[in-house]
Image: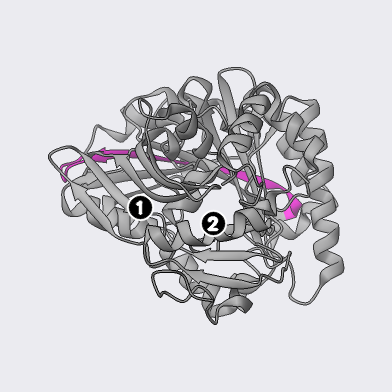
Amino acid sequence: MTGATGVKWVKSGVKEASTDFGHIVGSSPLGVVTARSATDVQELVSFAGPRGLPVSARGAGQALYGQGQAHGGYVVDMAALDDVRCAPGERTLTAGAGALWRDVVRAALAAGLTPPVLPDHLGGSVGGLLSTGGFGGSSHRYGPVADWVRELEVVTGTGERLVCAPDRRPELFRAVLAGLGQCALILRATLALVPAPTHVRRYRLYHDAPGTYLTDQRRLSRDSRFSHVAGQPRPALGGSWRYMIEAVVPHDGGPPADDELLIGDLDHDRDTEEIADLSYAEYVHRLDRDERLLRATGEWDRPHPWLTLLLPEEAAGSFVPAVLAEGAQQGLRLCGTVQLRPLTGRTLHAPLLRRPAGELLCLLALMRTAPPAAPAVVRRLVAANRALYERARTVGGVLHPVGALPMSPGDWRAHFGPVWPDLAHAKDLYDPHHVLTRGYGLWT
């Protein structure tokens, strides 16, 4: 099939587009569209919409549970829409939806600038991350990546190409950011930038108990000297877990404030603390080596039944240890990673990014890898995700919708709660045929 511009819509990428990084849910799309311009996307959506054919965008293919697949429809390959242009005088950067975050970092750092919030892994696409919100090590101060978007260019479900911003089509702007691709496909985004440090001092501080860990982590997140605060429960001997805080102080080559002044009043194990000075570029690329290793060992291509939750901090101290002690989570000790990091309610502004009530929050991510060719194990882990999600809701927790979790339309209505009518109205207005990003299962 060929569009009016003469560009071939369908290419030999159907097999790749029928799965994703999660390697759990498969699909059979009719074809893959190579989007080399906004017109290609417009033509495809204009064709598919009236025919009721699903359309989803694919950037780096980082979805975990078929969210970006289009069974019986078309997947738009956004990889060629990867232009990145930095405007240092305006402290902004404009990136195509298919650009990777490492491309964004490269262009921004060349001008001595950086996005205020960056994802930990820089191998995802700009469009994909903004559709879910995006968290990083500085989110306790600056909220999600989506809150730093200044303008979007999109193609709606009617095939219309529009530009939106907080003061220009604000309803559409709010519906796209953290909107799970339900109302429009992102073509490009303009992001705000801030001056980048040249170096950071990184502290890794270990705790034997979650109580002191959460107290110290929150203390560090309140201190303006620390630009990034994150953490991980890590397996320890005897089946227990240790809790590691990672806190970062930016500086410009000279030594930062005295270590004792920065961390001397904390309750971590002083004998195991790790302190290192890194260039800022080295720090933001800290997971690149891990990715290369996972690809080399084949673990990258195995099923990833991950789950990410936002929890009230007051519940995390008992909820997290109980989860880690469960038999269903024991695989995390051998093949996986757990993240537990602070968030602050007042910094989370995107209306469709749902969060628990209150000011002191935590992000909990269970990032498991399942054995290859073991569908029964994957099913058990997905079922464990569902059970854990239900328990989290009883303590005020909220899903961050990037994981492997089956959700019904009723679940989604409960998830979005008071903003569901706004999303449903925007869906009917901008995607009246309900063809965009059906993989989430919001409507059927």
Residue 264 image position (x, y, % from top left) = 39, 29
Query: Residue 241: within the magenta?
Result: yes
Along the viewing direction, whichever of 108 and 181 lies nearer the viewer = 181
**Residue at the outermost left position:** 89
Placement of 327 over or under 262, stated as above or below: below
Residue 110 image position (x, y, % from top left) = 17, 54
Q: Please tell me how crowded label 1 is: few (under 14), some (14-19), or many (20+) other residues with Cα within 10 Å.
A: some
Q: Residue at x 62, y 31 (%)?
A: 423
In which quadrant of the rendered view does residue 191 lie? Answer: top left
What residue is shown with label 2? 45
Q: Residue at x 81, y 45 (%)?
A: 386
Q: Report the disc number at residue 212.
A: none
How far apart are labels 1 and 2 at the CA level? 36 Å
Q: Which contiguous range is marked in magenta?
A: 238-255
Residue 416 image position (x, y, % from top left) = 68, 30
Q: Residue at x 71, y 64 (%)?
A: 71
Query: Residue 123: within the magenta?
Result: no
Q: Please tell me how crowded label 2 is: few (under 14), some (14-19), or many (20+) other residues with Cα within 10 Å.
A: many
Residues at discs 1 and 2 in contact (Cβ within 8 Å): no
Q: Main secondary structure of the magenta part?
A: strand
In which quadrant of the rendered view does residue 27 lie? Answer: bottom right
Along the viewing direction, whichever of 93 and 367 lies nearer the viewer = 93
Q: Residue at x 52, y 62 (%)?
A: 44
171 horizontally vs 53: left or right: left
Does label 1 or label 2 sit earlier along the sequence? 2
Along the viewing direction, whichever of 113 and 371 lies nearer the viewer = 113
335 horizontally vs 278: left or right: right
Identity, as a three-letter code, of the amino acid under mark 1: Val
Q: Report the disc number at residue 284.
A: 1
